Amino acid sequence: MPVLSTSPVHRFLLTAALPSLASPAQTVKAGKPIVADVFVCPGYARSAPGGGSMIGRKCYLLNDNVNPDPDITKRAPPFGYPDGPIAPLKLSDLENYAPGVNVFAVTDVDKINVPNPTVSWQSDLPDRPVHGQVRNELYFDWHLAAKKVDW
């Protein structure tokens, strides 16, 4: 979610990264989140249903399981889970599942890669990839790639 907030539940990467970007200084006031436009995918902003504010929307999806084993009990969430006992993986542990060059960390999000309508924010998503036949993905080795989506 590309929002700056004073709330302790908003532990987002952009809160730490925005000051390092060539972005105007933001003053965050309690109870008044601010959208950090630099983190909003323009394709998502054009394609998301309803348009309007980005507050509460998700335009990127973090990889929540790097283990190729389909057994749900063997899930390996690379970023951990903030409200549970699962710590983030160390990069060396990630390599036990696959080389970082082959595993995405962040991808564009749409209803194809979040097909479950019970996900509370699924209705905010575009129906298909916002970049046509591809999703932009950031990999754990820090390279970016446009990955073809078959839909």
Image (tube, rainbow, N blue to C red):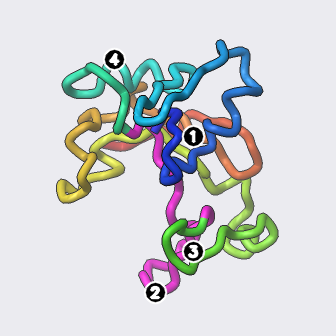
Indicate the position of residue 122 as horizontal and vertical percent values.
25, 46
Magenta-drawn stretch, dominant element (helix, strand or loop): loop
Q: Earlier in the sequence, mark 1 or mark 3?
A: 3
- Circle 1: is it few (<14), some (14-19), or many (20+) Cα within 10 Å? many
Give the SS element for disc 2.
Answer: helix
| Cα distance between the residues tagged 2 and 1 | 26 Å
Residue denoted by label 4: 46
* Rendered residue at 48%/53% (across/down): 9
Q: Note whether 16 is above or below 64 in the view shown.
A: above
Check residue 86 for magenta coloring. no
Decide which of 83, 69 is in the foreground and name it. 83
Looking at the image, residue 70 sits to the left or right of residue 118; the answer is right
Q: Note whether 113 is above or below 94 in the view shown.
A: above
Give the SS element for disc 1.
Answer: strand
Q: Earlier in the sequence, mark 2 or mark 4?
A: 4
Name of the residue lying farthest toward the right: 92
Residue denoted by label 1: 137
| Cα distance between the residues tagged 3 and 4 | 33 Å
| Magenta stretch in the rendered image | 58-79
Q: Earlier in the sequence, mark 2 or mark 1?
A: 2
Looking at the image, residue 100 sits to the left or right of residue 29; the answer is right
Q: Amino acid at mark 4?
A: Arg
Q: Note whether 55 is above or below 27 in the view shown.
A: below
- The mark found on residue 73 in the picture is 2
Quarter of the image for the N terminus: give it.
Answer: top left
| Cα distance between the residues tagged 2 and 3 | 9 Å
Residue denoted by label 3: 76
| Label 2 vs label 1, nearer the camera | 2
* Rendered residue at 45%/18% (across/down): 42
Quarter of the image for the C terminus: give it.
Answer: top left
